Image: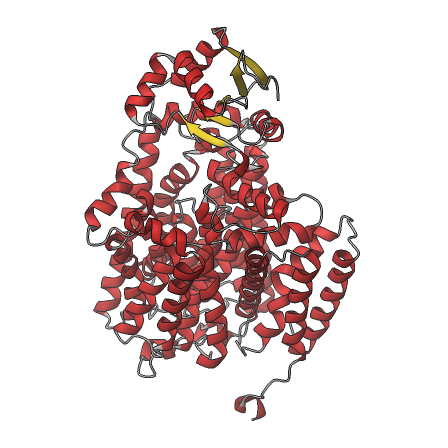
Amino acid sequence: MKRSTVPSIVLLATAATSVLVLFDINTAVRVPVVLVFLATIPGLGWAWRTHLPDPADKLLIAVTISVSLLVTVGEGMALLRVWSLTTGFLVLAVTGLLGIALPQRQRRADAV
Amino acid sequence: MLPMPRAEAGLPADGGVYPTGRLSQRRSDLLAVDVVLIAVVLWIVGVSGADPRAMSDVGLVSLFTVPMIAALAVLTAGFFVSLRRSAPEWVLATHVVAFISLIHGTPAVLFGTLRYAWSWKHVGIIDYILRTGHVDTTITALPVYHNWPGFSGGTALLSDLLGQSHLLQIALWAQLALNLFNLLAMRFLVRSLTGARTVVWLAIWLFFVTSWLGLDYFSPQGLVFPLYMVLVGLVLRACRRPDDILARESPANTMTLWSALPIMCLVMFVISSSHQVTPLMMVLALATMFGLRRARGWYVPAAAVVLSGGWALVVARGVTLSTVGSYLTVAQPLQNGSDTLAKSASVRGGQVLVSDAGRYITALALVVAFVGIYRMSRRHRLDLAATLLLLSPVLLLGVTEYGGEVLFRVVLFMGPFVAYFAALAVYPDTAPALRTRRAVIGALLTIVLLPGFLLSYYGKDAQNYFTPAEVSGVTWLYENAQPGSLIVVGSFNFPERFHNYEDFAYLSIADEPKDSRDRVLADPTGRLARWLEAGNSHMPGYVLITRSQKVGNDLIGPMPVGSLDRVEQALRASPQFRVVFYTGDAVIFTLANSGGGDP
């Protein structure tokens, strides 16, 4: 996956999942789309910032961050007694979007 | 997903020159994929029509057919042939993914219901969050899960976001998904130790062929174990000392500490808030690595101590302070280890073989791993960081007995490094491309390990399998019994506490002290009637006896064989009891003169 395609993937997946979750559309595509979103998208942009050379390692970091965020948001809402499907999803979506939107310092090696 | 530039794949250390040009290579790759497809088809043919009710006392292994064994043989041969000819990573990955899918997907497809009684208990905690929208750190029923709620909170959010009720489907397929996560994490971890692709994939293969513990199921441990591997991989990539020559040889080690640190902290937080023993292991591993100067950055282990200790003493303070005496059993490693072994003392029949198979496979893998350590030290290329990570789980024995399970956790956390050193025993990474002799040795090692793996991993499935009729009986009880009712069960080996779990009080005959148990078996009707009457005079109490409770007791005790059948017969014949629900595999009794009547 090229670096330039990551923002498009994050944007597309976030948009598709937003429609399904926020409008509570229960179609056959909801399960695969939401699963892929939760497993990869919140961490994808952040993983691509690590400059790991190997795509599978990047994918693993994306999954790790995404799963960790899912756990953190879920347990945070449960502990604080503020359970909300919409809030939980929006936190994950915004975190994923920040991963592609925040400016990134160029590594010296990249500039060479 | 996995083809990558040769320089990144570490091929210079590994050989890996394709034999006769690109076309021939592509043909060989496609042939390798065909081999995988043949193995999958053979497996499906072999498993089709199998009846899980017909499992004997060695579990799913008793349903194995010739095509299933042939499938594993074909897959093993295909993997080592591909490794021998330095096939691209995607070809090797296809073999491993197929192995994982066959081994860990089969119970989900064949059983159709969630495996392991304790998985159902985890479903119950998530069901609680989905019903109430919170956890209760002061709850008295299963408080540990409310105080370390990472796994249940995350899964509840996942289930909620998926829409309709998919919780049991998530749980059913979690074992396969977690093992695919383990595959990525294991590759990440081993690539931080070596650049030799052959070693990486051999280690991955051996890891999955020796992972017999079954701790990769729908559980906090199942979730945090791959995260632990990722954390260790990040530390190895970002925190190695600059003078560590072996670390510099791995082309994967290009991560800066500052890009890895936020991810490490996030992972450490999730581990600390999801599980009890993994944070302890995390602190021990990091303290060993940093204390013995195999890594730099004191703030990494400091962050692990602060996060895990902080969670235990702030969020989970109540449970921590009330259980610290029984949880931490410091300075008695032999006692802690023997507590685990004592758990298998009451097993019977085929379960003796299953128990021995687990010990055999662990011992054999350890011996091969130590051969790897010996070979690398002879070459003056022993990676001390990896050796410390292999040995550090043993320290758990000196700290906790973890409910008599600590030895299993030691084996679990040693697993990735046992597999790594075992791979080095077969193929030291300084050698050129994998020669035929070494490939044959690797395949033979697999052949020696696989029967033990299959027996120990699948061997307990006769009691871990719950029929749909059993599940529907238990579901009826949870949905119809009045809150506050006492539910007496034969044992906790059934789909336990997965719905409205906090509403009921439970009493397990098998878990009673021996004297009390013997009194129940001597006079089931009189004794159980007294229990139900003492439970709550305003509510009907229930006695639940299921097929899996009987199977579990008959295989692993602690009551004599047939005890629960005799209890059921006595209750059926007694005028003091009446059956309120029966599904064929689950029977529910209540007192005939129960004030509350039918639920």
Q: Residue at x 78, y 60 (%)?
A: A19
Which one is in front, B361 or B511? B511
- Vertical arrangement, residue B81 with respect to residue B385, above or below: above
Using the image, determine if residue B231 lies above or below residue B176. Answer: below
In the rendered structure, the answer to whether residue B109 lies left or right of residue B273 reads right
Residue B285 position within the rendered picture, expressed as x and y whole percent measured from the top left: 32, 64
Left or right, B459 with respect to B50, comes to left
Q: How is the image coloured?
A: secondary structure
Residue A91: image location, x then y, percent: 65, 66
Q: Is residue B379 above or below residue B322?
A: below
Res. B326 in view: yes
Q: Give the quadrant of the N terminus of chain A.
A: bottom right
Please identify the quarter of the rendering in which residue B302 is found: bottom left
Q: Foreground: B305 or A81?
A: A81
> Measured from the top left, where is residue B133 in percent x and y?
62, 50
Picture residue at 32% right of the left edge, 38% below the top = B357
Residue B586 place in picture, x, y as percent: 54, 21
Q: Assign the C terminus of chain A to one quadrant of the image.
A: bottom right
